Amino acid sequence: EQEETPGLGGVVAESEYLERFEGIKMVPNILIANDSSENADNEVDAITGATRTSKAFELILNTAYTEHLNAWTSYNE
């Protein structure tokens, strides 16, 4: 059952949201924050009303980054 606010989860695919990630550090991993505090260097704001989508997107980004980093490290050994 969908518990997100209808229509908000799709924002993760829009360029306006993705542009928030430019210049964000991926190390040790990226965080998508649900609070209103100032963001750290590896943190962006979550989508209001789409907490599950934001957390899933965070997991996808961190998993893909780790896999890419591991492959790159193995290739360069």
Image (cartoon, rainbow, N blue to C red):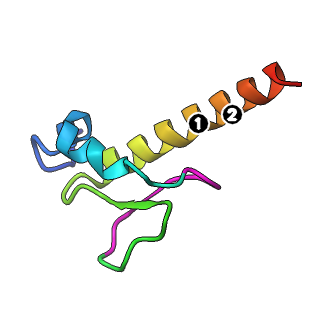
Which residue is tagged 1? 65
Would residue 51 appear left or right of 58 to someone viewing this image? left
Q: Which residues are magenta?
A: 26-35
Q: Is residue 51 above or below residue 15?
A: below
**Residue drawn at (41%, 42%), measured in percent from left and top?**
56
Magenta-drawn stretch, dominant element (helix, strand or loop):
loop
Question: 18 or 32, which lies in front?
Answer: 18
Which residue is tagged 2? 69
Question: Does the magenta segment cover residue 63?
Answer: no
Q: Quadrant of the N terminus?
A: top left
Would residue 48 appear left or right of 6 to someone viewing this image? right
Q: Amino acid at mark 2?
A: Leu
- Which disc, if any, is residue 36? none
**Residue drawn at (34%, 67%), measured in percent from left and top?**
34
Q: Quadrant of residue 46?
A: bottom left
Q: Quadrant of residue 19?
A: top left
Question: Does the magenta segment cover residue 30?
Answer: yes
Q: CA distance from mark 1 to mark 2?
A: 6 Å
